[in-house]
Amino acid sequence: MKSLWSHKFTLIFLFLNIIIISAIIHYRNLMVVIVPAKPTETVQKTFFKGTAPTEDEIRIFNKISAIIPTITVTNFDKTTSGKKSRAFLYNTRQKYCVGETLIVQIEMFDHLGNKKTYGGDFIKAKIFSTNLNAGATGKVEDFNNGTYHVYFTLFWEGRVYVSLALHHPSEAVSALWRARNQGYGLVYFIGTFINGTQQVKTECGFQLNGIKDVCEYRYEKENESYFCTKPKNFDCQSIAILQSFNRDFSFLNSLEKTLVKRENIAVNIQKDFEYIDVSTCARPPSAPLGECKIGMDSPFPSGFVLKNIWNPAFCKIKNFSTQEQMYTCLQDKMVYILGDSTLRQWFNTLTGTLKGLKRFNLHRAGLESLLMASDQEKNILLYWKKHSHPFVASHFYTVKDDNYMSREIDQLAGGPHYVLVISMGQHFRLFPIYLFIRRVLNVYKAVQRLLVRSPDTKVIVKIDNTREIDADPERLSDFHGYIQNLILKDMFSNLHVAMVDAWDMSIAYPTNNVHLPEHVIRNQIFMFLTYIC
C-alpha cells in the first residue's frame, strides 16, 4: 500500500512539474515572465529597520501586493501599447440619460499588435465637457486578461467626451512597485547640528548603512525611527535643520527606464467613438441629497465638476460664497491642519480670504514648517504644521520642534470646538511603501484614541491629489499616490471621519499640478466647511 501511494505521489509530482515548466516556456516565448509575488518575505527582509513588522503591517502590504502584477519584461514590444489598444462603447444605446452608467470596454494590445493576456495596467479615465467646465472620473474594472471596463456616471446634460489614458503599462507598474520597495537609495538628507556658534553637517535618513556611530531619533510608542550620523563633540539633540537631496541612483534597469519615459506615460487609448450626447430624460425623481456630514461613505467617483464647481455624488455642499458665511462656520473653532504643502494651500487660501485672520510671525528660517493665524474677535485659531519625516524639499527646514503626526494628535484635547485635518501622500512616494503603511497605522490609532476621549471632535482626511505627468516617475509617479490612497481610504473607512477626495477632484478638473489651482482649493475648503458645520 505504501509503495502504491509513493508511486502515485511521484506521478502527480512529475505531472505538476511538466505543467509548470510548460507555462514557464510559454511565457518566456512571449519574453514576459509572470512570477508569484512573495510580499511577506520581501517586507520582512528589506523594509523594516530595527523592529519586526506587525501582523497589521504585513496584512496591509500583502493585500496591496496581491493586486499588483509581478512581471519581468525583456522586450519593449511585448509591453502594453496605448496607441495599439482600442476602446469602444460596451452598452451602446439610442439615447443616453443623465444619471445612467456609461460602460466603455478597453482591449489592450502590445506594440506588435498582440492581444494582452494579463492585466495590471494603470489607466486614468474621465468624462468631460469643456464648454460646461465639467468633468468626472471613471471607475476601472480589470478582468486580468487584457480587457477592462470603465464605468462613468453621466452626471450632466450635453455633449460628453471620454478620455482614456494608459498612464503606465502593467510592466511599468510592476517595475515601479519592485523598485520602490527595494530600499531608500533615491533620497538622502543632510542634518545641521548647532552648538552655540559652531555648526556641523552629517548625513541623515531612515537607513545609514555601514555607519556605527549614529543618533537614533526614536518614538518608541509607534516604532518610528530616524537616524543621523553622530558628529563628534555634538549632542544628538542639537540637530536643528534638515534638507533633502536626490541621489543620482535608480533601482530600474535600462528597459524599465524606457517604459517610464515621458513619451510612454499617459498615452491616449484610441476610441471608435468621438462623444455621446446626454439628455435629461423622464424618470422617477431621486431623493434629494442631504448636506455632507462626517461619517458618510464616500463612493468612487465621489463627485463631479460642473461650471467649475465641485458637486459630491453623495451629499450637498453648503453655500459659502461670502466671507460672513465662512466666518459663521469657523467661529469658536480651533482648526489643526497636519500634512504637507497641499494642505498648506488650505491655510493660505483661508487666511487670504478671511481678512480677520491675522498670521503670526513665528520668525522661523527656511521652508515653512509651522503656520498660525487667529481672529480674536470671532475666537478662531488656525494652525498648520508639516508632517514629520520624510519631508522632501529643495530648501532647508527646521526640525527643532518636529513631531510625528500621531504625537501631535495625542497632544490635542479635542472636543466640540476642535477640528483636525490630516493628509499624507506626496513626500512618502519616494520611499518603500512599508514606511507609509506604518505611518498611516500610527495616525489611525492616534485618531482612534482622540475620538474615544473626545468623540465630538471633527476629523477630516484629505486624500492625496495627482501631480505633474513629467515628474520623475520612479520617485513621484501617480501610481505611487494611487496605491497610498487605497491604503488610506481602507484604513480610515471604519472611523467616524470625513474625506475630501482630492484625487477625484484633481482628475475631474483639468489640472496636472501637485499644487492645485486656487478655484480647486476653494472647492475643497467649501466641502471641508460643510463637514464641520
Image (spheres, helix red, strand yellow):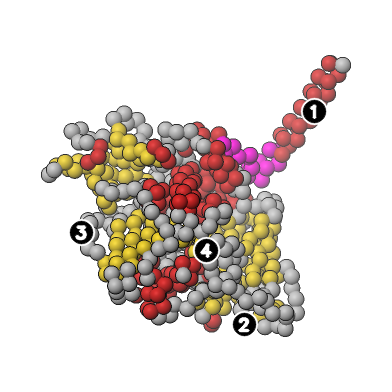
Q: What kind of element bears circle 4?
A: loop
Locate the N terminus by quadrant.
top right
484 to 285, vertically: above or below: above
Q: Which mark is residue 363?
A: 3
Q: In terms of image quadrants, where is residue 306? A: bottom right
Q: What kind of element bears circle 3?
A: loop
Write the start and end of the magenta stretch as one range. Answer: 24-40
Examine the structure image and report whether residue 39 is included in the region drawn in magenta: yes
Q: Tag 4 or tag 1, which sits nearer the N-term?
A: 1
Q: Tag 1 or tag 3, which sits nearer the N-term?
A: 1
Q: In terms of image quadrants, where is residue 132? A: bottom right
Residue corresponding to mark 4: 294
Residue corresponding to mark 2: 158
Of tags 2 and 3, the one toward the viewer is 3
For marks 3 and 1, give the CA distance. 74 Å
State the residue in front, 215 or 448: 448
